[in-house]
Amino acid sequence: EDAGMRSRIQEMQQRINQLEQEKMTLNISKAPLEARFRQKEDAWLKDQQKMLQEIESLKTESKERDDRSRELEERNENLEEEIRALRVDARKAASSLNSRENGSNDTWSRQLQNDRDVADLKEKLRHSEEEIKSLRLEKVSVESELSGTKMELISLTRAHDELQVEFEEMESSKSQNSEAEIQLEVLTTEHIAASAQLNAVCADLAATKSSAQAAMEAKEEEFKKEVEKLKFEMSVIKARGGVTDDDDDKANDDEVEDMAVLKARIEERDRRIAELEMELLKGEQLRRQMHNRIQELRGNIRVFVRARPFLPGDGQSTQTCLDVLPDGENLSIIDNRSGNPVDFKFDKVFPPSSGQDGVFEEVSEFVQSALDGYNVVLFSYGQTGSGKTHTMQGSGIGAMRGIIPRAVEQILSQAKIMQAQRWQFTVSASFLEIYNENLRDLLVNLDLRPDSLSSSCSSAARPASAAAQKLAIKRDRNQKSFVDGLTQHKIDAEDKEIGIQQLEALMAAAARARSVATTKMNAQSSRSHSVFMLHLHGINEDTGTIVEGSLNLCDLAGSERLDRSGAAADAKRLKETQAINKSLSCLGDVFNALGNGSPHVPYRNSKLTYLLQDCLSGDGKALMFVNLSPTMESGNESLCSLRFAQRVNSVELGKATKHIRRI
């Protein structure tokens, strides 16, 4: 066992070193990309602003010249009209002059006046014609300038389009850089989780070694005392028998023989103790199986408790308020108000050193029930920063994967195995969040077609739609709840490798779309409840059987106190906290009503309880994961979570219904 533990620690240390190297590589490649992007973006913005200003000025100048050209044309038309009028007046004057040639002196003087008027009109006509010529020349000049301006505008537009293409390329480079940052964040999270688990395993190993050393020393001391006692008894016997020197040699041989017999007896006793311990272990396993069977027949909501290890953000203190007992079912917590320990017992309790694989091993049979035709719900509960999202989703694609990816992988593996029994399964997945009592589809822009998948999960994302469809919880004709408008993405159950790639793309898209924020208690605090739904449909044409099951994995937002999280200083965070605490309070009201056998259960008081109504009303199986923080500062919240879990554990939903029918 020690060798296995050492090999596990070495593997985790190697993984940590690998993650640190990958993190260092990403940090090194990230800096020049960011500098280059910022330089390109600044230059592009300056050029774009300059181009836009020039385009606007050219447009304004072109408009002014168009207005000037129209004014000149109007003036030209007015002058031509005036010239025509003057010519008419000149002809009239000449006609009047010829008709009155023999008139009186008054007529003569009038004629002289008319001659002067005609001369003046001719002069005006000449000036008008000259002005028209100049206006025509100016019009030609303006038209040529306008043509040049239009050519320059076309050139600027072409340059603007080229800059736009370059900007789009820079945006694509920025997106790739963002993906590198996301990958770095995932690696950092995985590194922190692996380091924390390694520290917890080392602490457990040290405690185990210390207890084993103490037990060994106690046994050695007991053995020495027994040997001394036997030696004393032998010396007394020899003194009473008055043995000679020859007899001493014989006595020494007898002593050696007695030591061999004594050693054989001790070995026989140790072997018997080991057999009894093995029988006790088998009996304990049988007792747990019988307990789980009784809980299943009763329909009790099974409750698992998991204590996370200390993280770098918890500070230097390693004093914990939790004490997980070795039997895996009991724990005690220090009540900060009274200073006394409070004991609890649940279906399973995981210490801080428990890995993701050990946690999933306990829930694997529960997940298997979905393939058998049951509606299954598993939800994580606890204060913010207690490790709920790590338990449900995990990080990376290695040992730190959570329940959701492991559950889908198990279902795909089992579906592949059951193909030999003539079963054909169809698997589809949905992922939503409840944010401020509003349903939001986290996969609305996801494309899981095989040709769209690549090494980068972001390649499976489609461009954002103009407006996401509004989601609503409705009841079908069988009075079963469903979410109207929620997208379902098919997971390939034939090819496991493609199915895993689709799952990774799905999880990455959901993680990017989920509402998170930074609080004083958690740098990546979930501000919504997320629900991963896996819909299973199996058909066996040989037996004419159809099985329909579902797996609902809920990562609830953490309950938090405003004085510790600091959410009261931000109106948006305050509204989120109020919505989270209200929905969790409604969940508690539902469990209280179920535990008291109330005829009315307030499922409709929140979107969360209304969505889970079928799974909590006796139609399916339910399991609750309570996540705890080990710090002394979180002792009060952890105690409240454990008391709530104790009430939930006593709720009996009745025997679950298996959804199986004939074709």
Image (spheres, helix red, strand yellow):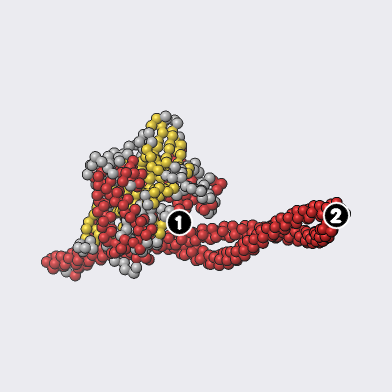
| Residue 639: x %, y % from top left | 26, 57
Q: Amino acid at mark 2?
A: Gly
| Residue 335: x %, y % from top left | 23, 61
- The residue indicated by pointer 1 is 396
| Residue 257: x %, y % from top left | 23, 61
- Measuring 28% from the left and 49% from the top, which residue is drawn there? 588
- Measuring 30% from the left and 40% from the top, which residue is drawn there? 618
Which SS class for mark 2?
loop
Residue at the right extreme, as displayed: 102
- Pick the front one: 570 or 68: 68
Quadrant housing the N terminus? bottom left
- Measuring 45% from the left and 38% from the top, which residue is drawn there? 425
- Measuring 42% from the left and 48% from the top, which residue is drawn there? 440
Q: Amino acid at mark 1?
A: Gly
Query: Image check: 151 left or right of 452?
Result: right
| Residue 258: x %, y % from top left | 22, 61
Residue at the front extreme, as displayed: 104
- Give the image quarter of residue 601: top left
- Pick the front one: 530 or 642: 530
Sequence-wise, the earlier of marks 2 and 1 is 2
- The residue indicated by pointer 2 is 103
Which SS class for mark 1?
loop
Query: Image check: 299 left or right of 555?
Result: left
- Pick the front one: 403 or 220: 403
Does residue 511 appear anywhere in the picture? yes
